[in-house]
Image (cartoon, rainbow, N blue to C red):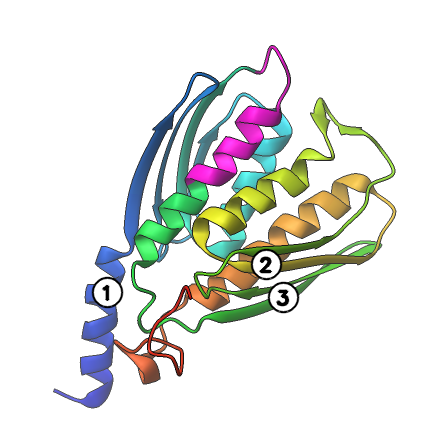
Amino acid sequence: MTVEAAIAKGLKGLNRMRKASVERKTRETDISVSLNLDGTGKSDVETGIGFLDHMLESFAKHSSIDLKVRAKGDTHIDFHHTTEDTGIVIGLAIAKAVGERKGIRRFGHASIPMDETLTRCSIDASGRPYLIWKVSFSRAKLGEMDTELFKEWFQALSQNAGLTLHIENLYGENNHHIAESCYKACARALREALETDPRQSGQIPSTKGSLGS
């Protein structure tokens, strides 16, 4: 067997394992997520919040993560609990799927333009959660969704997936473009950070020998 074939075989075996399903039920929400980190970006999303569905479909497409989400929440009150808890469960599923983080590239970066808007995202899949959010909106809502909830979603993702996550909107005018470019930039950076590196197969990408501390 050639070296190339051995690497391909090893990656194929790893890909089969990088899947996870998580369910989380509280008095406020009932959410289930299934995902495959090594998918093709297929999505099947129902959160009861149209704009959030749109963002998660874009997130799946550009991360190449196959993503299925079913969320029911107390949207008769507002969208906060459903939005935040969806970020929590997707983050938990990512952490479960990536496991000990052996052999991943760890770092990812993307700058995403959408017409007049440019947003960049940098990720360290270190297991240590931290969010830097330098994004502002000129409107309180997009559709029926409060724009302040986007930060809550990314905060929940960061905390539960174990990501150091920096998102910065450099410029832009259209609030839809600003929000969507944040999800796309995060997706592309995450795809890069969680990719398996054949040169680091089975190794923790840290001089400490462990991640998360």
Q: Residue furthest bottom?
A: 2
Q: How many marks?
A: 3
Residue at the spot x=45%, y=25% of the render?
A: 71
**Location of mark 3 (residue):** 110
Q: Residue at x 19, y 65 (%)?
A: 13
In the rendered structure, which disc, 3 or 2, sits on the residue that comes first in sequence? 3
- Residue name at image x 77 percent, y 28 percent: 141
Q: Residues within 10 Å of mark 1 (few under 14, many from 20)?
A: some
Q: Mark 2 and mark 1 in contact (Cβ < 8 Å)?
A: no
Q: Where is 108 relative to 43, above or below? A: below
Q: Is residue 29 above or below residue 8?
A: above
Span of residues in magenta: 75-89
Q: Within 10 Å of the Cα at label 2, are there few (<14), some (14-19), or many (20+) other Cα atoms?
A: many
Drawn side of residue 162 relative to residue 18, left or right: right
Badge 1 marks a residue whose secondary structure is helix
Question: What residue occupies the far left of the structure in this picture?
Answer: 1
The percent coordinates of residue 131 (x first, y second) are 62, 54
Secondary structure under badge 3?
strand
123 w.r.t. 36: above or below: below
Gap in angstroms between the C-alphas marked 1 and 2: 25 Å
Residue 23: percent from left, percent from top: 33, 31
Residue at 80 percent across and 40 percent down: it is: 175
Quarter of the image containing the N terminus? Answer: bottom left
Question: Residue 120 magenta-drawn?
Answer: no
Q: Quadrant of the C terminus?
A: bottom left
Task: State the image quarter where residue 149 is shown.
Answer: top right
Q: Amino acid at mark 2?
A: Leu
Label 1 sits on residue = 14
Label the magenta part by its dominant secondary structure: helix
- Residue 165, labelled with which disc? 2
Going by the numbered disc 1, the residue's amino acid type is Leu
Q: Nearer the viewer, mark 1 or mark 2?
A: 2
